[in-house]
Image (cartoon, rainbow, N blue to C red):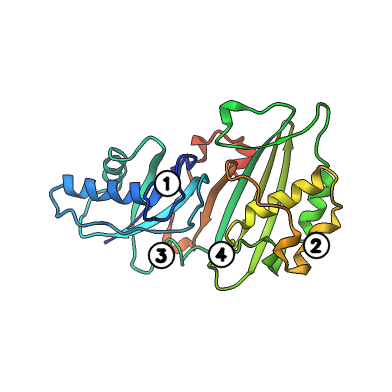
Amino acid sequence: MRIALGLQYDGSSYSGWQTQPNGNTIQDDLEKAITAFIGEQGAQALPVSTITAGRTDSGVHALGQVVHFDTQVERDPFSWVRGINSFLPKEIVINWAKPVSDEFSARFSAFERTYIYALHAGPCRAPLVSSRAGYLLLPPQKWFDVKAMQLAAQSLIGEYDFTSFRSSECQSKTPVKTIYSIDIISQEPWLYFRIRGNAFLHHMVRNLVGSFLQIGVGKQAAEWMGQLLTAKDRRLAAPTFMADGLYLAKIAYPEQFEIPGPWLENSWLPPEVAGA
């Protein structure tokens, strides 16, 4: 039996999603919890292996992560939710579980992913959200040129080679990805970026955000973004921006799989930002 799960997590204290030799990953804690629950139910506690829709980096969060795993244990959906959650740390929660066909893959069946970046800006940091939002120092009475950033975003819509925004550690077979939409939402002192595409390169969203901010503070013109895209040279774009404000918000799948959406009401982000 194949089981799909919907997760939310605060990744601020983790070394990312993917299992690593030194541990401390979301995948490690989730697989331990699933294995412990299956063991509690009387089945042989063999290690469980999960496949995920998106391998988030160190410090990155998720509102709507999706994973699947295979098991011989049969339980009703809420038993999976309640049982696995009882073994998870407070930073991770299962929102839903459902049996799916063997054709479903959390990774390969996904055709669209949405990331949100939440940024707080101003003369003082916001310590109560320090690990859940990015921060940029701005002088009093100073704000971003949002129209310039929105104009720059238009040059990224479509299928392009995003090498200029690709980490040197990226393992993707191709730098060509498709961006469907970029929304830049200004609610001073908050700025939100919502980027929807078929897939993303390693550090791509954070590299885009860093370059947008260069335009937003007036260090670069809106046309610079298109120039970076054409150049296909990572050295020319802005440095990778901090991970704190990045959220894997939503994964889209073909309707035939009937995969639930994320539980956005559990998010601190404004509904008009998280709910799109």
- Residues tagged 4 and 1 counted as in contact (Cβ below 8 A): no
Q: CA distance from mark 3 to mark 2?
A: 34 Å
The amino acid type of the residue labelled 3 equals Ser
**Identity of the residue drawn at 26% across and 44% down:** 79
- Residues tagged 1 and 3 counted as in contact (Cβ below 8 A): no
> Looking at this view, is 62 or 175 the one in front?
175
Q: Secondary structure at mark 2?
A: helix
**Identity of the residue drawn at 22% across and 46% down:** 36
> Looking at this view, is 69 or 201 the one in front?
201
Q: Earlier in the sequence, mark 3 or mark 4?
A: 3
37 left or right, relative to 26: left
Q: Is residue 162 visible?
A: no
Residue at the spot of label 1: 7
Q: Earlier in the sequence, mark 3 or mark 2?
A: 3
Which mark lies nearer to you, 3 or 4?
4
The label number, if any, that marks residue 170 in the structure image: 4
**Identity of the residue drawn at 24% across and 56% down:** 47
Q: Position of residue 131 (x, y in %)?
A: 55, 35
Residue at the spot of label 3: 105
Q: Earlier in the sequence, mark 2 or mark 4?
A: 4
14 left or right, relative to 139: left
Q: Secondary structure at mark 3?
A: loop
